[in-house]
Image (cartoon, rainbow, N blue to C red):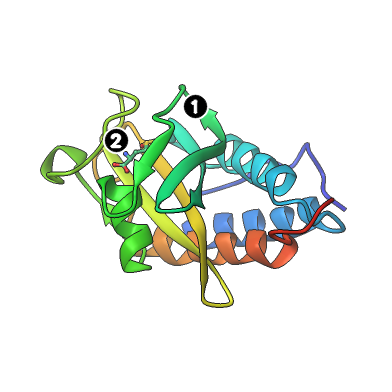
Amino acid sequence: MYDSSTQFDFRDPHAGYSQLAEALGALLTGEHDPIANAANTAALLFAALPEINWAGFYFLRGRELVVGPFQGKPACVRIPLGRGVCGAAAERRATIVVPDVNAFADHIACDGASRSEVVVPLIERHVLRGVLDLDSPRPGRFGEVDARALERIAGIFLGASRFGADH
Ligand code: SME
């Protein structure tokens, strides 16, 4: 059962992410709608993770990423594959950690407060569905521990969701 009063403790990031993964699994149990699950995943990440100013999804529509459920300031709606950090992660099908967004030549600024970013591609049985994107106002906020843990989080979201089905 998901418990909305859970306090997440990220003083030990491994422990914090374990707690978060468990809470997400409970939160998504029994629901298969990708939009509903993306909305709750974004809300949980935004509430649980320290030093985050944006957390959310872009979904692949043709050759573009289109913004999905998120928490944070309003964001750019459409990102062509290969553009920005999101488009690069989607095209490469690899997680990208950007410690300093000002040093990433093709970074697309949505919230001027963002200083670092991590983008995880959403790949379901070899099919690219979109990306999970997190921004932080602190430079260097995300590292390898975050990247691997957020890939696991993305896997929990994908495992629970049925794309292309009518719910
Ligand atoms: N910075 C991203 C765009 C999305 S926002 O951060 C929400 C990028 O360069 O792709």
Q: Is mark 2 within 8 Å of ligand 1?
A: no
Q: Residues within 10 Å of mark 1 (few under 14, many from 20)?
A: some
Would residue 78 be found to the left or right of residue 115 on screen? right
In the rendered image, the vertical position of residue 87 relative to residue 125, given as above or below: above
* Residue 12 in view: no
Secondary structure of the residue carrying numbered label 1: strand
Q: In the rendered structure, find residue 138 and report the number of the disc placed on it.
A: 2
User: Residue, x 56% and y 60% (percent of image)?
Assistant: 154
Q: Is residue 108 visible?
A: yes
Q: Nearer the viewer, residue 82 or 20?
A: 82
Q: Quadrant for ligand 1?
A: top left
Q: Observer-nearest residue: 147 or 119? A: 119
* Residue at (11% x, 43% y) in the render: 103
Name the mark nearer the viewer: 1 or 2.
1
Going by the numbered disc 2, the residue's amino acid type is Arg
| Residue 76, position as x, y percentages in the image | 39, 30
Q: In the rendering, at what x and y percent does residue 88 appear?
A: 28, 56
Kindly indicate whether the residue at mark 2 contacts the one at mark 1 (C-beta within 8 angstroms): no
Identify residue for label 1.
72
- 111 versus 163 height, above or below: above
Residue 124: give x, y in percent of width and height.
Answer: 58, 70
- Find residue 78 and report its image quarter: top left
- Labels 1 and 2: the sequence-earlier one: 1
The disc labelled 1 sits on which kind of residue? Gly
- How packed mark 2 is, by other alpha carbons closer than 10 Å (few <14, some 14-19, many 20 or more), is some
The number of numbered discs placed on residues in the rendered structure image is 2
**Rounded to the nearest whole Å, what is the CA distance between mark 1 and mark 2?**
15 Å
Q: Residue at x 82, y 49 (%)?
A: 2
Residue at the spot 12% in from the left edge and 44% down from the top edge: 105
Would the CB of label 1 be found within 8 Å of ligand 1? yes
